[in-house]
Structure formats: structure tokens, C-alpha cells
Amino acid sequence: MRHHQSQKHLQNDFDRVWGLLDAFGRQPLLTPKGHEFVAFAAVTTRGSHKGERVVRIQRDSQEYARIYPCCWRRTTNCNGTRIGGYSDALDSWCGLQP
């Protein structure tokens, strides 16, 4: 079941975001509202997205959200979790990378 909501305008595509996170490892970032989080690239090992690339979002050392390719450029992910601020931060971070 997909719970994606409204579109977001982002400069970078999911492939670039995932590739940079895969290359650079875990990245501590801040949302536009100042919430700290850590993002990293992974590949799912189970569930309906098994074998897919995913950007995992952690807050306070616990998983908070997952961003799959189908969720990129949306304000919520497949589970209805709000991911817009995390996407904004990831998009900005990618813009700073060569």
C-alpha cells in the first residue's frame, strides 16, 4: 500500500543521493527546522521492498524512516511517515558534493 503524499521539488535524484551516501557512509545532517538525524545507504533484506536500495534515517540512534526510490520527491514515504525535511536536507547536502 502506498501512502505517498504531495510532490517536492528537489534538485538531485535518488540515484545520486543513494550513491553519495554509499560512497561517504553515514552522514549527520540537520533538517531545515534544525532536527538532527543520520542518513545512510542500505539495501533492504526483507519485506515488500526486499532487495531495493533505501536511504535509512535515524534519530536518537533509532530508525525513524526509510526513503525508497518511489518515495523520493514526496512529502511522505510508503508508510505515511513524513520525510520532506529529511529529503530537503539530503538534497542540499548532495548539492555541496563534487
Image: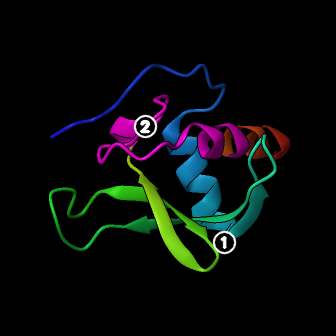
Height in image: 39 above or below 97?
below
Q: Report the residue marked by disc 1.
A: 26
Per the rendered image, the range of residues in magenta is 69-89
Q: Going 85% across and 43% down the picture, which residue do you hit? A: 96
Membership of 73 in magenta stretch: yes
Please report contact status of discs 1 and 2: CB closer than 8 Å, yes or no: no
Element type where label 2 sits in the image: loop
Gap between marks 1 and 2, in whole Å? 22 Å
Q: Position of residue 55 (x, y in %)?
A: 49, 57
- Tell me which amino acid carries mark 2: Thr
Residue 97 lies in the magenta-colored region: no
Residue 85 to residue 45: above or below: above
Q: Position of residue 2 (x, y in %)?
A: 22, 36
Q: Quadrant of the C terminus?
A: top right
Image colouring: rainbow
Q: Nearer the viewer, residue 95 or 88?
A: 88
Asked where in the image residue 74 lies, by quadrant, the reply is: top left
Residue 80: horizontal and vertical position, in percent?
Answer: 34, 42
Please give the name of the residue rendered at 19% of the width and 71% of the height, measured from the top-left corner: 46
Above or below residue 37? Residue 77 is above
Q: Quadrant of residue 43?
A: bottom left
Residue type, mark 1 in image: Arg
The image quadrant of residue 40 is bottom right
Residue drawn at (72%, 66%), measured in percent from left and top?
27
Of badges 1 and 2, the one in the foreground is 2
SS at mark 1 in the image:
loop
* Viewer-proximal residue among 94 and 38: 38
Residue under label 2: 76
Q: Dot 1 surroundings within 10 Å: few (below 14), some, or many (20 or more)?
A: some
Q: Position of residue 77 (x, y in %)?
A: 38, 42
